[in-house]
């Protein structure tokens, strides 16, 4: 085990600048994905729109994040393409933060969020893919750290935004009275916590006086400008890496180094081949993965592994999004009936647990295999969900269960990505498929759970998450069985190939 730790440290020292750059890029991703929830009501005031209208910006961001994840693989051909895409996307995120205060109409805000979502999707695919390519069989540890930085960015955003959020109605209606002003503060806190997820379902807003006409009083612009400044070092880090790799046009040796990388990839040792250039097979956009020329010649298990891995992350990321989006709604509804401020802490506890869990799994992934970590994590998710169902009247256990659930589910995505890529020998479209499926699940499962809650009541929220957890674990068992068949097929195929290549005795 000590030798493994030394190897990982050695790998990190060799690729520290690339690794830190990709981690910083995911910090930018976390900043962007978390700012809408706490600021959505102030943005409603800024655009003078209704609550139903402003929630379209959630959909706009999620939809184009999915699109960006699907097409992100197009930029994988060379390191220059990948870093150029990351440079543009991280700079665009800072630009969007700076422009959002100028969007005085919900349509303009939706367009800005669509651009940000597209950039986030590209970042998601490229950063994951580059780390997998860089570290391959040791990538699990570094992927855990990569996804830790998402949580870190998501935790920074509320801290920056909170001092600038309106404590009262930020659009003063003509007939606003003192009594309505004094009660609006708690109403805003309730609505803001209800929409802390991704705005998948609207609370009942008929009793809240949300004005659309009147004097706009909001300071949220300062929060966005601060976040734009915080994010600026990220594109600067990408640019520094490009300069270090001599990929910028101003470098006279740029072409020479690219040629050197190309020659290195053809070396007989094969060790550096996978670290410098991608295999020609797979890892384009999601649509390129469906190219008949690229999928020909693979066994059925090759495609089943892609499908099962994507389905597992579709469900687990959907659980994360659904739990973050609706745990507040569940807490303030019968039978718990928590206070708004108390229940509002649940979402923060959940994301803090996910962040701490990924930090812990950085160490654990260097000690245990991805399959073992995934088994423990998915079993833990099921146990916690079942206990939450049993003790559904306990407010204390809801806090404990929320924290433990965040710890258990935190490592599923990076572990699943590293495990799938290792099984497929880094030749398939695993990164593109898994990232796209995870983004789709995060959006689709929230909509499904939200519709069930609206029709069946808040208790169905825990039931939906528990059923989804069982389905994910069953799919994982099927995934392990398919992996066993795929491995045996590869062994048999290797033996058959060796026999075919062995010269016949007595031949000329």
Image (cartoon, rainbow, N blue to C red):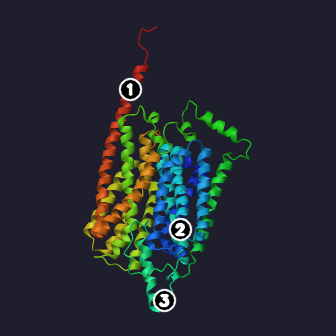
Report if the CB atoms under discs 1 and 2 are less than 8 Å apart.
no
Q: Nearer the viewer, residue 147 or 302?
A: 302
Residue under circle 2?
156
Report if the CB atoms under discs 2 and 3 are less than 8 Å apart.
no
Nearer the observer: mark 2 or 3; the answer is 3
Question: Measured from the top left, where is residue 56 in percent x and y?
Answer: 46, 65
| Cα distance between the residues tagged 1 and 2 | 54 Å
Q: Which residue is drawn at 40% across and 73% down?
A: 194
| Cα distance between the residues tagged 1 and 3 | 83 Å
Residue under circle 1?
495
Question: Measured from the top left, where is residue 225 in percent x and y?
Answer: 61, 69
Classify residue 276 by image quadrant. Answer: top right
- Image position of 328 (left or right of 247): left
- Image position of 313 (left or right of 174): left
10 Å neighbourhood of mark 1: few (<14), some, or many (≥20)? few
Q: Nearer the viewer, residue 259 or 116?
A: 116
Secondary structure beneath label 2: helix
Residue under circle 3?
175
Q: Which residue is drawn at 47% across and 54% down?
A: 66
- Compare marks 2 and 3 and give the one earlier in the sequence: 2
């Amino acid at each position: 085990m000590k030798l493994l730790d030394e190897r990982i440290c050695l790998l990190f020292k060799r690729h520290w600048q690339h690794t830190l750059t990709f981690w910083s890029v995911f910090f930018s991703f976390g900043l962007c994905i978390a700012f809408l929830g706490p600021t959505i009501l102030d943005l409603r005031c800024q655009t003078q729109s209704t609550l139903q209208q402003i929630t379209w910006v959630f959909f706009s961001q999620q939809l184009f994040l999915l699109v960006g994840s699907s097409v992100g693989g197009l930029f994988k051909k060379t390191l220059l393409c990948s870093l150029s895409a990351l440079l543009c996307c991280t700079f665009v995120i800072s630009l969007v933060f700076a422009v959002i205060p100028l969007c005085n109409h919900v349509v303009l805000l939706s367009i800005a969020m669509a651009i940000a979502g597209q950039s986030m999707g590209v970042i998601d695919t490229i950063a994951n893919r580059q780390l997998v390519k860089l570290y391959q069989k040791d990538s699990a540890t570094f992927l855990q750290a990569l996804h830790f930085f998402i949580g870190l960015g998501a935790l920074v955003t509320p801290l920056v935004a909170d001092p600038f959020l309106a404590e009262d109605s930020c659009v003063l209606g003509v007939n606003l009275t003192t009594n309505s002003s004094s009660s609006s503060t708690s109403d805003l806190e309730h609505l803001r916590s209800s929409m802390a997820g991704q705005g998948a379902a609207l609370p009942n807003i008929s009793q809240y006086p949300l004005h659309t006409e009147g004097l706009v009083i909001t300071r949220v612009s300062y929060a966005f400008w601060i976040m734009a400044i915080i994010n600026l070092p990220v594109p600067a880090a990408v640019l520094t890496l490009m300069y270090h790799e001599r990929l910028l046009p101003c470098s006279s040796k740029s072409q020479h180094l690219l040629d050197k990388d190309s020659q290195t990839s053809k070396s007989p040792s094969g060790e550096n081949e996978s670290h410098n250039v991608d295999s020609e097979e797979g890892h384009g956009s999601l649509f390129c993965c469906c190219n008949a020329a690229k999928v020909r010649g693979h066994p059925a298990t090759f495609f089943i592994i892609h499908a099962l891995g994507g389905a597992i992350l579709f469900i687990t990321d959907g659980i994360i999004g659904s739990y973050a989006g609706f745990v507040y709604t569940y807490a303030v509804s019968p039978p718990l009936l928590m206070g708004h401020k108390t229940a509002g802490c649940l979402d923060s506890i959940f994301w803090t647990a996910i962040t701490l869990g990924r930090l812990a799994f950085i160490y654990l992934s260097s000690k245990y295999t991805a399959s073992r970590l995934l088994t423990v994590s998915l079993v833990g998710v099921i146990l916690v969900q079942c206990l939450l169902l049993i003790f559904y009247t306990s407010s204390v256990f809801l806090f404990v269960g929320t924290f433990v659930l965040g710890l258990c589910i935190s490592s599923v995505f990076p572990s699943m990505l590293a495990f799938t890529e290792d099984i497929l020998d880094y030749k398939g479209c695993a990164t593109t498929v898994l990232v796209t499926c995870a983004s789709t699940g995060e959006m689709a499962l929230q909509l499904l759970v939200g519709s069930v809650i609206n029709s069946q009541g808040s208790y169905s929220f825990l039931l939906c998450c528990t059923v989804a957890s069982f389905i994910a674990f069953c799919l994982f068992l099927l995934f392990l069985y398919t992996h066993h068949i795929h491995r045996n097929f590869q062994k048999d195929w290797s033996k058959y190939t060796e026999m075919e290549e062995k010269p016949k005795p007595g031949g000329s």
